[in-house]
Amino acid sequence: MDFGLVLQTDPPASAVVGLMRRAERNGFRYGWTFDSAVLWQEPFVIYSQILEHTRDLTVGPMVTNPGTRTWEVTASTFATLNDMFGNRTVCGIGRGDSAMRVAGRKPNTLARVGEAIDVIRDLAEGREALVDGKPLRIPWVRDGKLPVWMAAYGPKALALAGQKADGFILQLADPFLTEWMVRAVRKAAEDAGRDPDAITVCVAAPAYVGDDLAHAREQCRWFGGMVGNHVADLVGRYGEHSGLVPEALTAYIKQREGYDYSHHGRAGNPSTDFVPDEIVDRFCLLGPPAAHIRKLEALRDLGVDQFAVYDMHDAKEATIDAYGSEIIPALNS
């Protein structure tokens, strides 16, 4: 199993670079960041420094979207980094939550996401693509490689990930929901004539190593609120009891009352008081190393190829080090 580290690009950027270097020393192979231009610093600028100061780490956004940058700019940026550092990027993409809503826009449609996946990948790998009806190709790209992984929860998004994406990003670590969603992605891939086993599966969630569960829950409760934004969209689209989305995902947002993006992804987020302990325990990895290992083994058995640690709490360095010393070796022994 591969491991990734997910950070917000809070200033100073040097701290983000330092944590990514620490992660690589501890056996992490991927470095991910949020991508929301108003809330955090521009990630692609910081990726150049992460790549410069690491040897093998692959970097990318978790996740970008097709609405905040034109597609040829996104592709050219990835291709430039790959040309400089040797194809060490991955494009995580989705509809856009905070990046779009904070700027006063609605998340992108799935049709737009699907089109963007093809265009960004083709351009970044040197092929011609249609952009707003005009054929474009980036002429200086040589031997470019850009895997595009799609974040998804709902049935239509899961189907799109299976039909088009090179990887599937699931932002929660509940084994029941993981099994349900991975199965949906792989079925869609098979129905589309693709090899379902060729799609990389990445589960991303907060991890907090330690014996004080009450403290760990409070440090990670924000995640249930973040996921809740997407779940609220699903309930609005499909209904509360449609049968199209598991109630194990949707039931907990009944007490949700709005969301303040100024606290997005941060411990102590006051907009996440509605998230019960049970959801924090299901969606995140908490407890001593042995508890993390057990849950990660269960996820690996369900076909998860990478676990990406959301490291937004008061024990960033300790979590990276605990994973490097005890958890990563146990999963890869």
Image: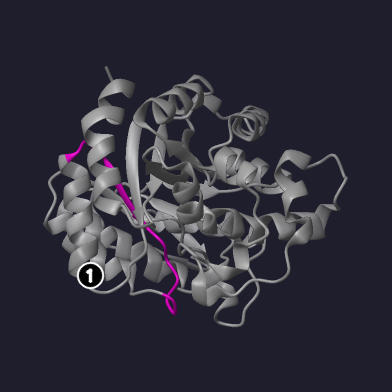
Residues packed near mark 1 inside 10 Å, few (<14), some (14 to 19) or many (20 plus): some
Q: Up-down: is 55 above or below 232?
A: above
Q: Residue at x 25, y 46 (%)?
A: 318
Q: Up-down: is 212 above or below 109?
A: above
- The residue closer to the viewer here, 179 or 119, is 179
Rendered-image quadrant of the N terminus = top left
Outermost residue, bottom side: 104
Is residue 67 visible to the viewer in this orientation of the structure? no
- In screen coordinates, is 77 left or right of 26? right
- Quarter of the rendering containing residue 319: top left
Outermost residue, top side: 333
The region drawn magenta spans 26-39
Is residue 150 visible to the viewer in this orientation of the structure? yes
Q: Up-down: is 306 above or below 262?
A: above
Q: Please check the rendered image and state whether residue 252 is part of the magenta-colored stretch, yes or no.
A: no
Amino acid type at circle 1 is Ala
Q: Residue at x 58, y 66 (%)?
A: 97
- Quarter of the rendering containing residue 101: bottom right
- Where residue 329 sits: x, y (%)? 25, 24
- The residue closer to the viewer here, 313 or 12, is 313
